[in-house]
Amino acid sequence: MSKLTPIFALALLLLAIWPDVAQACAVCFDATDENRQAFLGTTIFLSLFPLGMVAGAGLWVRKRSQELNGEDGTVFREDAE
Amino acid sequence: MSAQSATAEFDRRPEPVRREKAVSNGVLGMIMFIFTEVMFFSGLISAHTIVRSQSAGQMWPPFGQPRLPVEETAVNTAALMASGLVLVLTWLAFRRDPQRARIPLLLAIGLGAFFVLFQGAEWVALLGEGLTIRSSTYGAFFYLIVGAHGLHAVGALLALGWTWTRLDRGRLTAEQLATVSAFWYFVVLVWPVLYWRVYL
């Protein structure tokens, strides 16, 4: 197999999945501006909100862990030294 | 280095020990469950927002449908918020002395029960005025969103009742109280958003 084969395969894949404008959802292009804005707003909200929640929880658990165990997260028993 | 000296060196190393968990298993599990619930309500609210936006320039509520009791529900909302606040006081009291948490916990449950009963009375009145789940999209969304929240409130109240019985028997742990409280805080905090989107 030539070294260029994977690059060609990747280029073909990119061409195949390249997005195009398609009216998959008829109401997404509703005549009213309020409806379009509602779709845009809820799409952004539903896309970013779960990521924000998971990131927030992760940071909170990390902060709690650092508060309890020190920076590296490891606690050593003093009497074992 | 011989195998024996290496073993001796290894034995001299300080032994890692576990201290208090950053987050208890119960609370972490509840947080993950709450995430799924938040997305469930987000989906409902998003669908409601889109349907409502399609009626831009038209009447909302639709013609012939009753107006929702905004003012009365504002009072009920205040009762639910107060319940959440009292549950925070319950937690603080529990940390000092578990037996001192009995009355605030009972008060939080009472305020939550008031909210659910008030909602029930509101539903009876709205059904009498002709707003049903099949009368319009407006009615369908109202009963679906507010009903889903009401079911969560009932479930959380049952869990709070369980914590009270354990507290009464002196068997309630801080983790159990924190876990159930987290669910009640979710029920309390999601309601203003639902009120804003559905009622106003």
Image (spheres, rainbow, N blue to C red):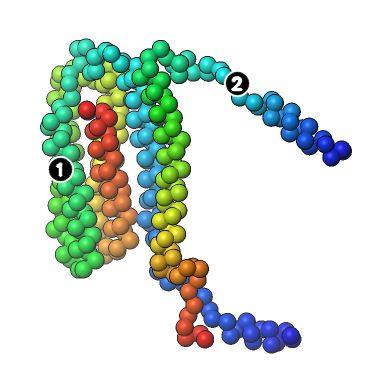
Quarter of the figure with the C terminus of chain B:
top left
Task: Give the CA distance from mark 1 to mark 2.
Answer: 51 Å
**Residue projecting furthest to the right:** A1
Seen in the picture, residue A80 relative to B42 is either above or below; the reply is below
The residue at 44%/55% (across/down) is A59
Kind of residue sitting beneath label 1: Ala
Residue A16, numbered label: none
Which of the 4 quarters of the picture holds residue B140? top left
Determine if residue B121 is in view. no
Left or right: A3 as drawn, with respect to B34: right
Looking at the picture, how far across and down is residue B126, in whole percent?
Answer: 17, 23
How dense is the environment of label 2, judged by Cα within 10 Å: few (below 14), some, or many (20 and up)?
few
Kind of residue sitting beneath label 2: Asp
Secondary element under disc 1, as helix, strand or loop, is helix
Secondary element under disc 2, as helix, strand or loop, is loop
Which of the 4 quarters of the picture holds residue B179? bottom left
- Circles 1 and 2 on the same chain: no
The residue to which callout 2 is attached is A20
Task: Please state which of residues A7 and B97 is positioned toward the viewer in this rendering.
Answer: A7
Residue B79, numbered label: 1
Seen in the picture, residue A28 relative to A50 is either above or below; the reply is above
Q: Return the chain for callout 2.
A: A
Seen in the picture, residue B6 relative to B170 is either above or below; the reply is below
Which of the 4 quarters of the picture holds residue A36? top left
The residue at 18%/24% (across/down) is B68
The residue at 41%/12% (across/down) is A31
